[in-house]
Image: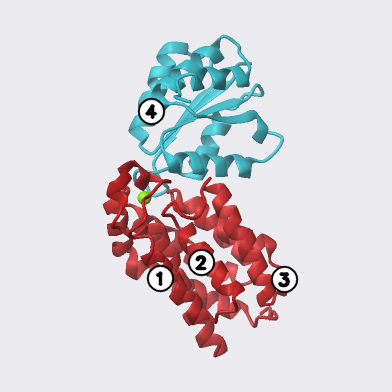
């Protein structure tokens, strides 16, 4: 079972667009889900929606999450904490640009790489 | 109604939540303006949505012991605010609720508050001096440790929020502006100072403190 990918953006349009680009690259070989927008539908993120996206993309091999800006990261960390162990340690946030990171991570995941490798591949894109 | 050593009853808790939600609503435009200047302009609307959601569950919250009610209110903020301030203010309340004994005195409150502020710092991967709500949360801790009365704590909180104006933002969306973040009050700091004022006024009305 391949590592799943979750895209979390402040904008649902960005999140869906990134997910489309990932899908084009890896088809159905990777569990994929996206979310974007605050609980009222404005720009922002929602812990509930992030939790649902992680559930949807869930794989026992783990889930790599790509986020855009600050609040997306903080809300994702919160969601992971609420999900709790044993699943929490199988969820990793990639410190990588959301578009390129998602595509790199998904491509790596589609080859069956473990979570740590998927995350490291996405993070190769980040300046140290 | 559960009575604790501080005299914090569920009625006090109810008044506090109502007053906080009202203050946030009355200041939502100002908070959003502050956030528009150095951020994404959603802070007032986000906080208002969060506190309205807490208000909507007030009847249920007021049946719980105060620490449990704080935890539930914090959780509600996390789920409804939608910006980074949701997890931050939510973590403050959830940690307070987790650390407070059912029956707490002032000293127990200060100890729990210290853990709560540290939890906010950890959640935000931040520290004092970065032009964030921590620059008001820590001065409140200092004032309480020094034995300041609620009014004095609120005044120190307001002064601390004012003191974020000349600061350079190095965390959060405002940090993207670099030097241009100087000259504006941090919206998170403004919210916390506002809420500290509400707490002081509510404690005074209910306890003649
Ligand atoms: Mg904002």
Question: Given contact means CB atoms under 8 Å apart, are the residues at marks 3 and 4 in contact?
Answer: no
What crowding class fits label 3: few (fewer than 14 Cα within 10 Å), some (14-19), or many (20 or more)? some
Q: Dot 4 lies on which element? A: helix
Q: Give the x, y percent position of residue B115.
A: 64, 59
Q: Please tell me whether mark 2 sits on a helix, a strand or a loop.
A: helix
Q: Residue B139 shows which numbered tag?
A: 2
Q: Are marks 3 and 4 on the same chain?
A: no
Residue at screen point 56% across, 69% down? B142
Using the image, tell me which numbered label, if any, was put on residue B159: 1
Looking at the image, which is closer to me, A106 or B190? B190
Chain bearing tag 1 is B
Q: Is mark 4 within 8 Å of ligand 1?
A: no
Ligand 1 within 8 angstroms of badge 1 C-beta: no
Same subunit, tags 1 and 2: yes
**What's the distance in space between the residues labelled 1 and 2, CA to CA?**
9 Å
Q: Same chain for marks 4 and 1? A: no
Chain letter, disc 4 residue: A
Q: Is mark 2 within 8 Å of ligand 1?
A: no
Which is more foreground, mark 2 or mark 3? 2
Look at the numbered discs 2 and 3 and tell me whether their residues touch, using CB distance below 8 Å. Answer: no
Q: Do labels 1 and 2 touch, CB within 8 Å? A: yes
- The chain carrying label 3 is B
């Amino acid at each position: 079972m391949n590592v799943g990918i979750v895209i979390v953006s402040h904008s649902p349009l960005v999140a869906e667009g990134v997910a489309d680009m990932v899908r084009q690259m890896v088809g159905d070989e990777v569990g994929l889900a996206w979310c974007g927008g605050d609980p009222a539908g404005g720009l922002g993120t929602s812990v509930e929606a992030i939790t649902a996206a992680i559930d949807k993309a869930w794989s026992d091999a783990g889930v790599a999450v790509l986020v855009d800006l600050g609040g997306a990261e903080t809300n994702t960390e919160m969601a992971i904490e609420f999900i709790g162990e044993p699943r929490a340690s199988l969820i990793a946030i990639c410190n990588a640009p959301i578009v390129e990171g998602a595509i790199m991570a998904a491509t790596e995941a589609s080859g069956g790489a473990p979570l740590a490798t998927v995350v490291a591949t996405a993070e190769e894109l980040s300046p140290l | 109604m559960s009575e604790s050593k501080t005299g914090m009853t569920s009625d006090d808790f109810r008044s506090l939540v109502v007053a906080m939600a009202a203050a946030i609503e009355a200041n939502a435009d100002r908070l959003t303006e502050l956030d528009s200047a150095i951020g994404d302009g959603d802070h007032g609307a986000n906080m208002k949505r969060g506190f309205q959601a807490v208000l909507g569950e007030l009847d249920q919250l007021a049946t719980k012991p105060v620490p449990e009610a704080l935890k539930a209110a914090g959780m509600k903020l996390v789920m409804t605010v939608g910006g980074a301030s949701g997890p931050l203010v939510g973590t403050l309340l959830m940690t307070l609720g987790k650390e407070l004994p059912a029956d707490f005195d002032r000293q127990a409150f200060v100890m729990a508050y210290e853990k709560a502020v540290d939890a906010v710092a950890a959640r935000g991967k931040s520290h004092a001096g970065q032009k964030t709500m921590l620059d008001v949360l820590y001065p409140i801790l200092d004032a309480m440790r020094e034995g300041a009365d609620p009014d004095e704590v609120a005044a120190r909180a307001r002064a601390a929020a004012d003191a974020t104006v000349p600061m350079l933002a190095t965390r959060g969306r405002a940090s993207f502006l670099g030097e241009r973040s100087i000259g504006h009050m941090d919206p998170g700091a403004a919210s916390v100072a506002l809420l500290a004022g509400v707490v002081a006024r509510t404690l005074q009305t209910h306890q003649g403190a």
